[in-house]
């Protein structure tokens, strides 16, 4: 697992950070707007946003005095691709199970 994927999974491990991503999926938000949606201090939210940024799941742009946070779908892609790499494993296992069930069914029909 590369460092990029490692950071994404670290960021995704926390339910608050996942909820922040849900909010950012809808719209870009300032730190204050994120804080307004949670019962947490600004400092706590800032820490969560920093971890999301380190995991490349969000990006931040400065607009005047505000820091605008936005979802970065490419960061999510690395985690999604890593998980998807296991689909072949499950496809093979489910195919084996299907074959076994069909073989058993064929034996009972005889």
Image (cartoon, rainbow, N blue to C red):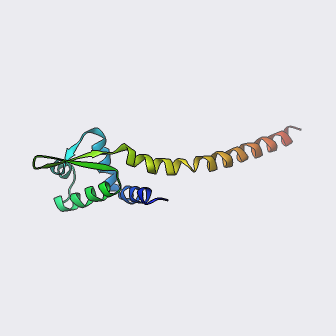
Given the current orientation, which residue lies at the most extreme right position? 110
Q: Residue at x 31, y 41 (%)?
A: 25
Please name whichever residue, 62 or 80, is drawn nearer the observer in this view of the structure: 62
Given the current orientation, which residue lies at the most extreme left position? 65
| Spot occupied by residue 10 in the image (x, y as percentages of width and height) | 39, 60
Q: Residue at x 32, y 58 (%)?
A: 54
Q: Is residue 81 left or right of residue 60?
A: right
Q: Which of the image's four quarters has the C terminus? A: top right
Q: Is residue 63 visible from the viewing direction of this image?
A: yes
Q: Residue at x 76, y 43 (%)?
A: 99
Q: Is residue 79 left or right of residue 36?
A: right
Q: How many marks?
A: 0
Q: Tell me where residue 24 sits by quadrant.
A: top left
Q: Is residue 86 left or right of residue 5?
A: right
| Spot occupied by residue 32 in the image (x, y as percentages of width and height) | 15, 50
Please name whichever residue, 24 or 54, is drawn nearer the observer in this view of the structure: 54
Residue 63 drawn above or below residue 16: above
| Spot occupied by residue 23 in the image (x, y as percentages of width and height) | 28, 44
Q: Is residue 16 visible from the viewing direction of this image?
A: no
| Spot occupied by residue 67 in the image (x, y as percentages of width and height) | 17, 49
């Amino acid at each position: 697992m590369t460092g990029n994927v490692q950071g994404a999974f670290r960021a995704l491990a926390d339910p608050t950070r996942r909820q922040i991503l849900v909010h950012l999926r809808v719209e870009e938000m300032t730190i204050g707007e994120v804080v307004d949606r949670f019962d947490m201090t600004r400092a706590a939210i800032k820490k969560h946003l920093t971890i999301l940024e380190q995991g490349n799941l969000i990006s931040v742009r400065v607009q005047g005095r505000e820091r605008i946070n936005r979802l970065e779908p490419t960061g999510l892609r690395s985690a999604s691709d890593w998980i998807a790499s296991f689909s072949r494993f499950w496809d093979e296992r489910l195919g084996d199970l299907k074959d076994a069930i069909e073989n058993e069914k064929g034996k009972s029909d005889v």
